[in-house]
Structure formats: C-alpha cells, structure tokens
Image (spheres, grey):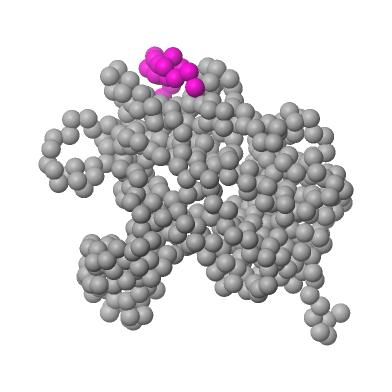
Amino acid sequence: MSRSNKRHFFNKVIENITIAGVAGEGKAIARHNDMVIFVNYGAPGDVVDIQIKKTRRRHMEGEIIRYHEKSASRTEPFCEHFGICGGCKWQHLSYDEQLRYKQKQVTDNLERIGKVNYPFDLIPILGSEQTQFYRNKLEYTFASRRWLTPDEIQSGEEISNPEALGYHIPGFYDKVLDIKKCWLQPEPSNHIRLGIKEFAIKNNINFFDFRTKSGLLRNIIIRNNEKGEFMLILVLFSGEEENRERLLNFAQQNFPEIISIHYMINDKQNSSIADLEPVHFAGKPYLTEEMEGLKFKIGPKSFYQTNSRQAYELYKVARDFAGLKGSEMVYDLYTGTGTIANFVARQVKKVAGIEYIEEAVIHARENSAINGLDNLVFESGDMAKVLTPEFMERHGKPDVIITDPPRAGMHPDVLKQIKASEAKKIVYVSCNPATQARDIEILSDSYRVKKVQAVDMFPHTQHVESVVLLDYEPQRHEGAE
Ligand code: SAH
C-alpha cells in the first residue's frame, strides 16, 4: 500500500476486525488487508472497531472504539487506574494467557532472530507466585495540576483538589495521573504516598508546577525489603529547609515501617535522579535484603532487581544452568552490585564481576565482605574495554560466563571476547529476548543453545526475562583450517 493511500486511513474506523495476537511491545495486533494495526488493550480473539490514529510506513496505530465480541482470554482488570495509567497494560489478560505470550515472545525471537534450531530443552515459563504487590521500589511524581481523566472532563464538575502524586501518563513527562491505589508495592506503600500528599496539601507545601517550574515537591521514591522495612527518598526542587523537615518528620513519626529516610535536591529542568547526591536524613543509611542467608545492601540509588522473590527464582535458574561443581572460574558480566556473583560464589573457586558503574562495584565489594566471601573480584568500566585477553590473563580464563546485559544486549567486541575465552558454558540472562536472540546468532559458530527458560518478573506487563544455556561447540566448516 502506498504512503498516500495509507494517509487517508487517518481517523477512519475499520469495523469488525479480529485481534490476532500481541506484539513484543505489549500492544495487540490486528491485520487489515496487508497492513498491521497496533492497538492498546486488545485481547487476541476480540472482535472490535478500530479508529486509526497514526499511519506509518509499515504499520498503523489505532484505538479500539467498540467491542463486538470479547475474547475468552480476557479477565476483569482489578485496578481503577487501568487503561489510563499505562503501568500494568496486560491486566485484561488472564495470567495464564500473559505467560503464554511471554513464552512465545522468547521462542519466536530465538527462532526468527536467533535462527536457533530445536532440539533444545525448552522449560516452561516460570510464573511469579505473587502477581500483585510484587515490586520493591516505586517512584511517584508531584504535580500542582493533575491530569484529568476523560470521565472527569466529561462530568464537567469543578475540580476542587487539583494536585497529583502519581505516575506520568505514558509519553508525557509533564502530565501526572493522581494515584489512589497502586497494586504494585506492598502496604504501607499506598498509605505513605497518600499520607504525604495529604500532609503537604494541608500545610500548603507546594507541588511542582511543570509550566512555571516552581514548587518544592518533585518526587518520592519508596523502597522496601522482604522483611517489610521501608526507605523513603524525597526529591525537592530547592534546599528550603523548613517544609522539608516538617514533611520528613511527619513521615518518620507516622510510618514506623520507614527505617531509612533520605532526600535529594533537584533544581534541574529534568527529573532524572542519576546525577543527584542523596542526603541521609534519619534512620538507617540503607536497607538490607537477604537471599539464602546472603545479605545485600540497598542504598537510596543502588540497583536491585525490583521483584525480589522472583529475582531469587531467576538466580536459581541461572545457577542451575551453570551446573557448578566447585572448581570453576566464573565471570559475572554486567554484575550490578554483584548479586549473581555473590549468589554463586560459595559453589565455585572464584568469581570475577564486571560492571560499568563504579558505585555499584563498590557496593558489590561491600556485599562480598558482609557475606564473608573472599573469592570474588570486581572491576569497573565499559565491558568492551574491560573484558580483554589481559583481563583473562590476570584473573584466569573462565569456565562459565554468566551474563546479564541491559536491554541493548552485548557489544560485538564483547561477543568476540566471549568466543575467544572458549568458556565451556555461557548462561545468558536477558530482559530483552530480541537482542538476546541477536547475540546468540552471533555466537552460533562457537556456542549451541542447550536450555531455555523464561521467567516472569513483571506480571501484567509485557516484560519477560529469558535465561539461555549455551555450550561451547565450535562448528567446523568444511575447507576451513
Ligand atoms: N546482574 C545484575 C544487574 C543487571 S542490570 C543483577 O541481577 O542485579 C545490567 C547492568 O549492566 C547494570 O548494572 C548496568 O550498569 C550495567 N551495564 C550497562 N552497560 C554496561 C557496559 N557497557 N559495561 C559494563 N556494564 C554495563
């Protein structure tokens, strides 16, 4: 279909179209003639009318405006903010169905992008036992004027309480949806957020105004551990002391679960906290999480997997795939604060971890020290620069490489070094099955897929973790030396 032909689809309604599947980004897909249409909140099997909102070169985007038939795979979303918030976009699909699509996302990518041929051991996806209140960290945004839902606008009622403390509307940094109850983090997470909001309004402490760039309160970050201890981090636009102290004292006195309080000053235009220095206000300086008797320090800015219980399951899969016997040299690439490295250290001779962020490496070393482990070393820097023949000479060649890269996957130089290492096994943990499959294809002249297991860390979202075991089996090409 030519571009101009497609353009006149804009705002047109396509009637009685069946939702055919779900796409990697979490949207549902429908097909009209030879065009793919992406829509939010569709379930495969729904028969709907779709209004086209965007036409692109190879696809269109639309909105479901009427349901003729609802799919049997649907379930009733439990959250009042579903459909506007954008946080848990798959709540309308039953959990079994969500797992089925996540598993499919992993195998489709391996087949299409990874060109992986069966047989390999495909272990059924590991669902999360907790499908609600599974997160240990949430960040909320203050806004002096909240985003009004279509229902509120239609009702025409006067808005008496304009402030918001909630989430950004997807794609809009300055539009904030006020959240009443969020189902992601255990209580008292909601109570803390609502309590802080009420106290600030009563005491005339200003919420951030995105238009005039003024107002004291910008964000709160709430973290918790499995023991039910909480950390509160307040992000403020200025160093104004009186209101900051009033608010933080209120939180400390009213929520005994909060054992660690920090604040940060953000006087920039953007809301990124990566470059901000946390200031310890009260209580303990950090939370401690435990896993199999191992302890991990969580500071206000530390990375820690956000679904702690399922992270434990993920790490067990990775360790299991590694098949450790006790004498191995293991590399843990993209080690973060050394969680996987510490987790396998007791079963091996030595672990070497590599991580970009210097601060995380310091925490990784501290974690090993707290746990009384002395067979770990960590180096910081860009993987492509740190993982070199000299590194392997210094620490010993790896028997097993565990790798857990960010969504972009691994750099070609890193893949080259992995091949050169001739490690017997690679355990590839990934939060992006597409880049994982791409990397596996690049490794395929030296490594063969043996086992695959998807793990769901984020129920009601399209995200999936994939763990793949690769064995060193260099391919001999005929005629090649
Ligand atoms: N395995 C850890 C963290 C995985 S997240 C855990 O389970 O907790 C991926 C990590 O890769 C992050 O800590 C990020 O800082 C690091 N990282 C991203 N790009 C990198 C690069 N080019 N070189 C080294 N580390 C990198």
Q: Residue at x 14, y 46 (%)?
A: 154
Q: Quadrant of the N terminus?
A: bottom left
Q: Residue at x 68, y 68 (%)?
A: 120
Q: Residue at x 23, y 72 (%)?
A: 15
Which quarter of the figure has residue 33?
A: bottom left
Closer-to-camera residue (101/241): 101
- Residue that sits furthest to the bottom in the current view: 479
Closer-to-camera residue (329/315): 315
Vertical position of residue 257 compared to residue 449: above or below: above
Q: How many marks?
A: 0
- Residue that sits furthest to the front in the current view: 72
Magenta residues span 238-258
218 left or right of 303?
left
Q: Quadrant of the C terminus?
A: bottom right
Measured as percent of width and height from the top left, residue 362 is found at 70, 34
Q: Residue at x 56, y 31 (%)?
A: 225
Whether residue 250 appears in magenta in the rendering, the answer is: yes
